[in-house]
Amino acid sequence: MKTLKLLPVDLSLFGLLLLCTTFTPVAGVQPTVHTIRISQMQFNPATLTVHKGDTIVFVNKDIVTHDATEISGKAWKSPALASGDSWRMAATKSAAFYCSFHPVMKGKIVVK
Amino acid sequence: MVLFIAFALQLQTAAAQNKQNNPKLSDAEVASVAVIANQIDIDQAMLAKERSKNQDVLQFAETMINDHKAVIKQASDLVQKLGVTPKENAVGKQLQADAAKTANMLRTKSGSAFDKAYVNNEVAYHKAVISAVEGLLIPESENEELRNLLQSIVPALNAHLEHAQMLQKQLNQK
């Protein structure tokens, strides 16, 4: 007769599943993660529409260093993102932004 | 200004001649010219950092140093991977000779006259380099990865040109 053996890894997975089930909100919309890819000296997409609370990840796939700076320079600014670096922020309100190293690079976030 | 125009015309002439003639640069020579062209802009930017007090000009110069260093690193990594040793050639030597003349001219200027001369040179230089990369270096490259690298730096060169033109407009309004 075969016996069911639960290995430690199985138990930890079971525990994780239980935790997720317990603490995941039943109602409400989950925040979405959006990516703005920086390549060829452009933010792509240049205009991104999101919901309040969504996460926006800037990923630098270019050869050179960039950043993402809110247009007034006062609301928010990413650190310098070297090639391969990324930075995430929570979307709270609509904003225009640019790269402070290359001011001709511009983008826009629209929070619905 | 005469120097900028002479330099720009020289690069553009080389690019135009290339369209009619057979390729004259090997990949090793193309790599050498690419590194020299980037190093020249780094050197001019270092001069700007020494002589300018204008924050916008200083920030532009800093960006030129960082971006062109990044391009040189990409080129160096690629030639190492390909086992190519950049080879000196007449085009590269001429670029260096012209850049030395431009640097001498810039050293005679200070204050806003320096800022205008530096930024004017950056506009002319980037126009000339874009023309040379598209009309001479890319067509001359036989290796696909080298050609792809050169193509990938054109958007950065265009962004630098637009940035320099923006500064040029600002400085001319003062």
Image (cartoon, rainbow, N blue to C red):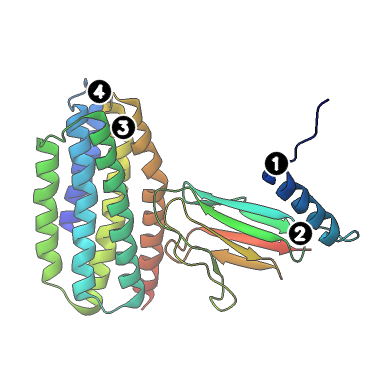
For the residues marked 1 and 3, what is the alpha-carbon distance in whole angstroms?
Answer: 52 Å
The residue that disc 1 covers is A7
Q: Earlier in the sequence, mark 2 or mark 1?
A: 1
Which numbered mark, 4 or 1, is in the foreground of this view?
Answer: 1
Which secondary structure, mark 1?
Answer: loop
The residue that disc 3 covers is B146
The residue that disc 2 covers is A31
What is the chain letter for disc 1?
A
The amino acid marked with disc number 1 is Leu
Image quadrant occupied by the N terminus of chain B: bottom left
The amino acid marked with disc number 3 is Leu
- Give me the residue at 82% from left, 61% from top: A23
* Crowd around label 4: few <14 · some 14–19 · many ≥20 (10 Å): few
The amino acid marked with disc number 4 is Gln
Residue B127, can we see it?
Answer: yes
* Crowd around label 2: few <14 · some 14–19 · many ≥20 (10 Å): some
Q: How far across and how far down the image is residue B119, in percent?
A: 29, 64
Residue B96 as seen in the image, left or right of residue B79: left
Closer to the camera, B18 or A108? A108
Residue A65 as seen in the image, left or right of residue B126: right
The amino acid marked with disc number 2 is Pro
The reply to whether label 3 and label 4 mark residues of one chain is: yes
Which numbered mark, 2 or 1, is in the foreground of this view?
Answer: 1
The residue that disc 4 covers is B20
The reply to whether label 4 and label 2 mark residues of one chain is: no
What is the chain letter for disc 2?
A
Contact (Cβ within 8 Å) of mark 2 with mark 1: no
The reply to whether label 3 and label 2 mark residues of one chain is: no
Image quadrant occupied by the C terminus of chain B: bottom left
